[in-house]
Image (cartoon, grey):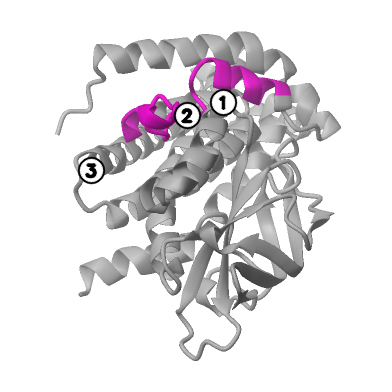
Amino acid sequence: MNFKLNEEQKMLKEMVRHFAENEISPVAKELEQKREFPSTLIKKLAELGLMGMSVPEKYGGSETDSLSVSLVIEEISRVSPSLAVIFSVHSSLFCYSISKFGTEEQKRKYLPKAAEAKILGAFSLSESEAGSDATALKTSFVKKGDKYILNGIKTWVTSGKNANAFILFAKHKTASEKRKLSAFIVDKDSPGLKITKVEDKMGLHSSMTSEITLEDCEIPSSNILGNEGQGTKIAFHCLDYSRIGIASQSVGLASRCLEEAIKYSTQRQAFGKNISSFQTIQFKIADMSTQLDASRLLAYRAAYLADQGQPFSKESAMAKLFASEAANKIAYEALQIHGGYGYSKEFLIEQLYRDARALTIYEGTSEIQRIVISRYLLR
């Protein structure tokens, strides 16, 4: 297993780093403060061919390997964790789900527009009483003629307010089996669909997380993804894949935290010398760097396995678990190195500390990742 980047991946990483520094970084703080969705940046990502990285060339995309997608998410997250999760959900959940399970008609309808960011995709599984236990959801559907009618309330939908289409999960109104979910592609302008709430979150402020209400929402029968009853399989497989993206988001955020900690420690003086000369600070930085490298290697391994067509569910769970928890630890220590200034909104580390907290929660909490990992080991 070789994690040395090839020339194409190196060029991609360098290109995205340059774009992130010159286009994203100058506006990222203002977007967060104003809680403004980064629509212009998304269009620019599309112009670079990045929004279609999970879309086959046949449908207008620039389909690349999973490791390349991870590199892009990492570089974006380094300057804007909010934009990174928007990009990750669009690429690793919406586009990937349709590419993997969609019909030819669905692929032709949604993927070319998604690759050009003419539509933004989202993924809607969670409900108020169905988060970690995804199969306990109450949103239901019935089929009437050539349409499906959906009813329910979906929560914690990343980009929900701004997305144009959702991969959305429901169970048959009369289904007796708990795990029999079905997946649907639901357009935002479908009759009966309303965005009823935008969450006021602790962090990730330019990523709009929303509640969706479905009241006799009508969609054409052709918009079912896969077959009826395949929703659990689709959801779990796609979440396995997208966790590589969250691990990469964690790596990007953590790398920026480490950079900020090093920069501050080499400038801040105490007792007549830079605090970076104190062994306590040096040990913190050494531990942070080691945790970051371990996180990156776990993410790369999971992406490598996905690219090789090998099983990767356990490895993606490991990557997401370790990288997200490491990012929180690294953000904590970076803020600690800043001392009182780290608690001030004047310094970037304050925002990164808040942004990091979501990483161990969405797309499967740390506790769920441990369940996934242990099940594979104890079979």
Q: Is residue 323 left or right of residue 21?
A: left
Residue 360, given in percent of the width and then of the height, sits at 53, 53
**Discs 3/2, front:** 2
Q: Which residue is mark 3?
A: 305
Question: Label 2 is placed on what type of residue?
Answer: Gly
Is the residue marked by circle 3 packed among few (<14), some (14-19), or many (20+) residues within 10 Å? some
Q: Earlier in the sequence, mark 1 or mark 2?
A: 2
Q: Earlier in the sequence, mark 3 or mark 2?
A: 2
* SS class, disc 1: loop
Q: Which residue is mark 1?
A: 116
Q: Which residue is mark 2?
A: 52
Proximity of marks 1 and 2: CB atoms separated by less than 8 Å: yes
- Tell me how far mark 3 sits from mark 1, CA to CA: 28 Å
Q: Is residue 143 magenta?
A: no
- Magenta stretch, residue numbers: 40-68
Q: Earlier in the sequence, mark 3 or mark 1?
A: 1
